[in-house]
């Protein structure tokens, strides 16, 4: 083992350096996880509860009972006032679409898109365009910003539809929700697909980077640090949501989220994610974070060139071949 005048060898020192580099990258992923938790676990679901979840009684409008002032302001109107509503809680019709079920489009898109994007990586590599790590992470952030923008546009038109036609009171489970009469919950499918595309580029790349760049004997610790960064981002996202006091209006059956400009909240997160994506590029270029390479190819070259770490798991010796003995012939 090579030593540099201390009790730790060169490979152990290099392992610690690589671990510190990974920790810096994980810190840069916290803003993404903050926005991701808002999209998947909180905002999209809560938005879907206030969209039309049935296929019938569409575009029923009570425009004659709404003041001209609210109509003229549209989405910017104060919708906390006592607006007229269509009570559909006691009527029978088509079964409702559970808003939580639309998250399945996220998983379906990942399953279908992931093999396709791997072929795209190989095709671009033949054309001389490498799918570098920072490019894939940056593209994942851009897609997350697009998903939040799509949700903001949907929320804008939802508010505008309520200002023009009033509310549609529907029941999901045992809870009443005041929804938009003309905007279907199916319009959330594009934003869920954009989130799935964002996961393919950011989440999958982050897991690959954490696994291949981590020291062999620290892979469990590194993956734990990756999920720790995700947990910190989720906590920040929850605190931010309650700071803007949207949850009280969303979860209460007697109120609705129209009291606050929920579309602004989506746009603020989208702009924040867009700005941070360019900050991420600057930091990755200024600091040596090993993001300017192709993950799998770098790992293969490292295995071929670098000596095995002294702290790595030792290889098991090969088993001896067992030769069967014929006792009848030996007795003869």
Image (cartoon, rainbow, N blue to C red):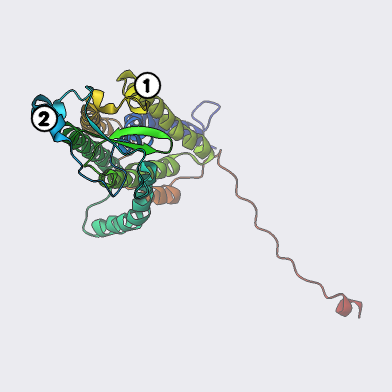
- Where residue 87 sits in the image (x, y, percent)? 30, 36
Gap in angstroms between the C-alphas marked 2 and 1: 34 Å
Whether residue 285 can be seen here: no
Q: Which residue is mark 2?
A: 71
Dot placed on the residue nearer the N-terminal end, 2 or 1: 2
Q: Is residue 228 left or right of residue 79?
A: right
- The spot of residue 79 in percent (x, y) is 20, 25
Q: Secondary structure at mark 1?
A: helix
Which is nearer the eye, 43 or 139? 43
Q: Report the front residue among 230 and 91.
A: 91
Does residue 204 appear left or right of residue 161 in this picture? right
Q: What crowding class fits label 1: few (fewer than 14 Cα within 10 Å), some (14-19), or many (20 or more)?
A: few
Name the residue beneath numbered marker 1: 239
How many marks do you count on the picture?
2
At a point 33% along the width and 52% down the height, the residue shown is 109
Residue 264: give x, y in percent of width and height.
Answer: 20, 27
> Foreground mark, 2 or 1?
2
Is 188 located above or below residue 319 in the figure?
A: above
On the image, which quarter does residue 180 sit in? top left
Query: Disc 2 on helix, strand or loop?
Result: helix
Quadrant in which the C terminus appears: bottom right
Is residue 325 visible to us here?
A: yes
> Which quadrant of the figure has residue 163?
top left
- Disc 2 vs disc 1: Cβ atoms closer than 8 Å? no
Density class for disc 2 (Cα within 10 Å; few <14, some 14-19, many ≥20) is some
State left or right for residue 76 relative to residue 309: left
Residue positioned 28% across, 27% down in the render: 257
Residue 53 x/y as whole percent:
32, 43
Say which quadrant the N terminus sits in.
top right
């Amino acid at each position: 083992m090579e030593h540099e005048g201390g009790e730790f060898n060169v490979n152990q020192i290099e392992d610690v350096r690589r671990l510190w580099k990974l920790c810096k990258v994980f810190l840069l992923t916290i803003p993404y996880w903050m926005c991701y938790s808002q999209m998947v676990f909180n905002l999209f679901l809560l938005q879907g509860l206030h969209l039309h979840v049935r296929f019938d009684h569409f575009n029923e409008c009570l425009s004659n009972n709404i003041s001209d002032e609210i109509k003229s302001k549209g989405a910017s109107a104060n919708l906390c006032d006592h607006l007229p509503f269509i009570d559909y809680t006691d009527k029978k019709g088509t079964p409702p679409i559970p808003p939580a079920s639309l998250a399945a489009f996220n998983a379906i898109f990942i399953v279908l898109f992931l093999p396709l994007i791997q072929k795209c990586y190989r095709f671009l590599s033949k054309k001389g365009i490498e799918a570098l790590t920072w490019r894939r992470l940056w593209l994942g952030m851009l897609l997350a910003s697009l998903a939040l923008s799509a949700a903001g546009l949907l929320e804008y038109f939802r508010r505008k539809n309520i200002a023009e036609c009033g509310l549609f009171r529907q029941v999901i489970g045992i809870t009443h929700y005041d929804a938009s009469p003309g905007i279907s919950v199916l319009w959330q499918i594009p934003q869920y697909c954009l989130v799935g595309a964002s996961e393919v580029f950011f989440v999958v790349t982050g897991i690959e980077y954490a696994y291949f760049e981590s020291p062999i004997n620290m892979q469990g610790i590194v993956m734990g640090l990756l999920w720790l960064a995700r947990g910190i981002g989720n906590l920040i996202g929850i605190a931010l949501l309650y700071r803007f006091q949207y949850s009280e209006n969303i979860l209460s059956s007697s109120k609705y989220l129209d009291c606050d400009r929920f579309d602004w909240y989506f746009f603020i997160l989208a702009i924040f994610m867009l700005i941070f994506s360019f900050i991420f590029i600057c930091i990755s270029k200024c600091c040596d974070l090993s993001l300017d390479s192709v993950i799998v190819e770098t790992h293969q070259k490292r295995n071929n060139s670098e000596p095995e770490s002294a702290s790595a798991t030792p290889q098991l010796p090969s088993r001896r071949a067992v030769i069967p003995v014929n006792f009848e012939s030996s007795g003869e």
